[in-house]
Amino acid sequence: AQSVTQPDIHITVSEGASLELRCNYSYGATPYLFWYVQSPGQGLQLLLKYFSGDTLVQGIKGFEAEFKRSQSSFNLRKPSVHWSDAAEYFCAVGAPRAGGFKTIFGAGTRLFVKA
Amino acid sequence: EPEVTQTPSHQVTQMGQEVILRCVPISNHLYFYWYRQILGQKVEFLVSFYNNEISEKSEIFDDQFSVERPDGSNFTLKIRSTKLEDSAMYFCASSGTSGLSYEQYFGPGTRLTVT
């Protein structure tokens, strides 16, 4: 069965510092991988996605993620965090179906940014 | 840019009442979904809908839930007799113009509060 593990429930970084959020997935075939961000009380915004090709994926807001098949990982990175990046981040794996697509989300990592 | 919209943004209802959550998917999409996020928890798949029928549903999606595409533009989720544990954020999503499409576009969510 597909699953996503985000080992860190919350992370605190200083503004301007680098960030890495960890994500491990379990999926039997080629995974379709996503990172979403959610501000409190808001919806889900897609940061980036990986379907195939280059394993280093660039997203919006200066985020990138690297797919490592050997480690079943898809970690999210940002070289310099801004206070506005404080939010909940969800890693997700997508499973294509004949009747559509099913996204399985991790439990999320809450990012706190200190001045 | 086209987007998925949901109404209302917040719904308060009493236990045992019926609620209908409404979504307008992206106009040329073929696949429709509902997800749920209980406060502080991860986003969970409820149901997918294609060609006017349910293509997949989770164990959460019991007989109290139903979905419908009544008029070719709206996509609704009905909860027949709400329980306290139905309190959550409900996200609608859509995908696909033809064949399989691997990116879901999420709406902003409806926060359902059952009292």
Image: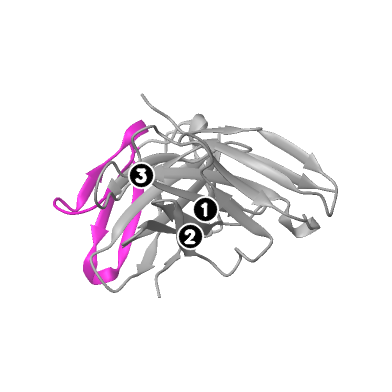
- Using the rendered image, report if marks 1 and 2 lie on a common chain: yes
Disc 2 marks which residue? A106
Q: Secondary structure at mark 2?
A: loop
Disc 3 marks which residue? B30
> At 46% from the left edge and 31% from the top edge, which residue is drawn?
A82
Disc 1 marks which residue? A109
Q: Chain of mark 3?
A: B
The picture places residue B92, in percent across and down from the top left corner, at: 52, 44
Q: What is the three-letter code of the residue carrying label 3?
A: Leu
Residue B38 can be seen in this image: yes
Camera-nearest label, 1 or 2: 2
The Cα atoms of the two marked residues, 3 and 2, are separated by 26 Å
Q: Is residue A94 magenta?
A: no
- Using the rendered image, report if marks 3 and 1 lie on a common chain: no
Camera-nearest label, 3 or 1: 3
- Left or right relative to B49: residue A71: left
